[in-house]
Image (tube, rainbow, N blue to C red):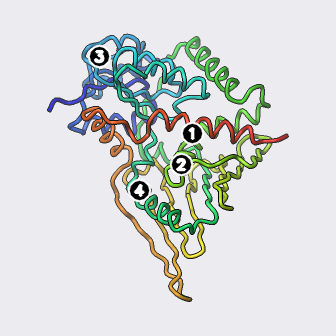
Amino acid sequence: MKPIRVGVIGLGMVAQIMHLPYLKEMEEFEIAGVCDASALLAEKVGGFYGVDFRCTDYRKLLKSNRVDAVLVLTFYHSDIAAAAAAAGKHIFCEKPVAFSVREIDEIARAVDGAGVVFMIGYMKRFDEGYIAGQKLFKKMSADSDVRLIRVHDACFQNDLVIRSMYKLWKYDDVPPRVIRETSAKMERRITEAVGSAPKFVRQAYRLLLETGSHDVNVLRGAFGEPRRVLSTEILPRGNWFVSVLDYGDEVRCVLDIARTARNWGDEVITAYGMSSTVSVEFPNPFHKNAPTVVETTDMDGDAVIRRRIEASHSEAFRNELHHFAECIRKGRQPLTSLQEGLQDTRLMVNIIKGFKK
């Protein structure tokens, strides 16, 4: 079977550390083109991976009949995603898929009827440890044993970790006009989402989009959609917030996210019940093949039984690319679909709107 020919748009950190190496080694794919606003970076990456097609304008890549699918690994996605759908290319789009619900609607109009696969890069949903924990969460829900859900994410900058583990290429030749125009588009989309909110509230929304989108998505994968947002508190610097979500039947979820120390973090989702507690703790995502750990606490009469489960050392970033290839081959809807992105964005907007000054 011929490999799927992919064009990679956006050659920054996540592309260099994760996506490009896995694409290169996987039989399902062939890297057919690379694109970045930095001409020097496109040349460097193209040369390293032996890719002749190198450009700085994604529209040029999309016109190529040598490209079947694209990975959109930039931070602002909608223009590229819509153009890719119009060009008949399958799309893998990193999170956050969009900054506002209106923006997702625009992407959906382009994708609908185009006959292409659209998948969001929520790699944690393909983490074998999370999948093992997800089954236990669903059993707790089926048994009506869930009393409290907590999603906690003390996120970090990763700079020392990444510098000590990886060699990244970065150049300063991106035209200032491109940076200004992209920043303006992002700010306009944030205004679409949260209106004329104070700067620190907009900053909290950015934190949700950049990091919390993963947390919101794994929460949905485990427990579904909350009924409503009950409250949100945001600190004045916008680098910490806590929200309480209603999951019905006196079940509440406390979602707290903070930007903290530079080089370590703490990301965990826990369900507390009357007879069981299940916790899924994610490792630093840039520690390749580090296992996500599931810990359970159960009662057996008066005895407390604790277990630690390391389901797999398989890499979630690689697993999601396998899923993308399978969806293209078999014409399937991805697990992390555009509809999930719409639900996530709507919930994140409601979390921010739950803040009362």
Question: Label 2: which residue?
Answer: 220
The mark closer to the camera, 3 or 4, is: 4
Identify the residue at horizontal 27%, vertical 38% (top origin): 326
Q: Which residue is mark 4?
A: 131
Q: Disc 2 residue type?
A: Arg
Cα distance in 3D space between marks 3 and 4: 38 Å
The part of the image, by quadrant, that contains residue 344 is top right
The residue beneath circle 1 is 344
Q: Quadrant of residue 41?
A: top left
Nearer to us: label 2 or label 3: 2
Judged from the image, the secondary structure of the residue bearing numbered disc 2 is helix
Tell whether label 1 touches label 3 (CB within 8 Å): no
Residue furthest to the bottom in view is 302
Comes first in the chain, label 1 or label 2: 2
- Which quadrant of the figure has residue 48? top left
Amino acid under label 1?
A: Asp
Residue at disc 4, secondary structure: helix
Question: Counting residues from the N terminus, which is met first, the one under dot 4 or under dot 1?
Answer: 4
Q: Are marks 2 and 3 in contact (CB under 8 Å)?
A: no
Residue 53 numbered mark, or none? 3
Q: Earlier in the sequence, mark 2 or mark 4?
A: 4
Identify the residue shown where x is 26% and y is 14%. 65
Of callouts 2 and 3, which one flags the residue occurring earlier in the amino acid sequence? 3
| Nearest the eye: 49 or 135 | 135
Position of 265 with respect to 357 (left or right) is: left
Between marks 3 and 1, how big is the CA–CA gap? 35 Å
